[in-house]
Amino acid sequence: MNGQPLSRALSGFLFAAVMASGFTVDGMAVAQSVQPAPASTVADVRQMGADARKDIEAYTTAGGAAGGADHRAIKWAAAMWQVHDAAPNSEAGALAALDAIRLLVRAELWDRAHGRVESLGADDPAWVRVASAVYEEAVARKSFDYAVTTLTRIAAATKTPTIKSAALLVIGRVHRRQGDLPAATRVFQEARAAAPGTPQAEEADGLVYEVAHLSVGLPAPAISGKPRNARRAITLESFRGKPVVLVFWAST
Amino acid sequence: MEEVPLLKALHAKYSNEAVILGISVDISVDRVDRTVKSKAMTWPQLADGKGFDGPIAKAYRIDGTPELFVLDRAGRIFARPGSARQIEAQLQEALARPERP
């Protein structure tokens, strides 16, 4: 894909998306010479995302501005949205919608991102993932009103428990970020109750724990053990009186 | 791991006034020992070889690295630096506070 013009890079995907969606293609010569493309897979969407990021990086490196009307994220997002629309109930379709919105958010194309978000029906499976992209948008803009308004509306309108739970999780995260810990805990608990036994409920449990045990100002959870590089065991408690920096790390 | 030089500098500068405690989430303690030695990480290093499933990693809800916490003199969570670069400013703030504010 390196060095390939955007139009060519995109047309392959658009063509695959169009074929997958069952539309006919003008020009029999073209149609006959190409096998009908299989529906886009998760791997296709991931590849598309990787290609999009490379292409967008080239655009920004060449001086392309965030928020620009000629930003390449616009075309890539449109191509991904076709993949979503061709198979909205598939994993690939949901991922494509998520990635389209992420690309628009990272390009600071807020209105376009909102337009895509709002075009999703309240029971579109993509919401389970897109809810977190709406949160990313809010964090990037340091403005949470849009996320709260949109996700409150979706949580009320959807008939899908996991979507309701995913929307509530984001609303809870906003409360947590704004320092309203009681409200965060209440909404996380609502999120858990909305979809028992799902990954969303598990995430809600984790977030309730984080608020209760890992918020700024709370006593740090106990630590004890013998360091690999010391003779005697230590406890966090024994460091009382000095600030401590905890570094969780892994070899690379 | 790119944070190691920064941590070394912090350890050298603040070792009398503050503690740096490493907690490895590697799934091999031998690997931890090799890394600690080869990178000359001289501050205390805990490791149980259980990855993200170890009791400390679970208590702190660690699901990626690096993950950083600054604790105040009373052992309370003071800050969650987003990167190693942010540690020093937050550590200085923690140092400026008395144990019982």
Image (cartoon, rainbow, N blue to C red):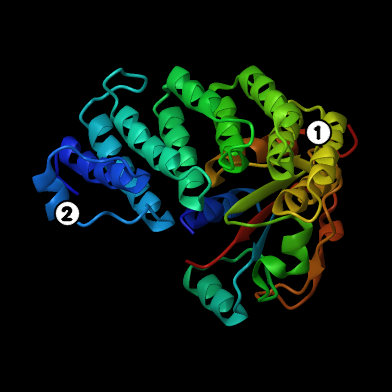
**Residue in the foreground of this view, choosing between B28 and A195:** A195
Which residue in the structure is indicated by mark 1? A184
Label 1 marks which chain's residue?
A
User: Which labelled disc corresponds to residue A85?
Assistant: none
Residue A246 location, x and y as percent? 69, 54
Looking at this view, name the residue that lies furthest to the right. B100
Which one is in front in this view, the residue at disc 2 or the one at disc 1?
2
- Going by the numbered disc 1, the residue's amino acid type is Ala
- Quarter of the image for residue A167 reads top right
Residue found 41% across the figure and 22% down from its top: A109
Residue found 17% across the figure and 37% down from its top: A26
- Quarter of the image for residue A136 reads top right
Which residue in the structure is indicated by mark 2? A34
Q: Is residue A51 above or below residue A101?
A: below
Residue found 44% across the figure and 41% down from its top: A84
Answer with left or right where residue B54 lies relative to residue A17: right
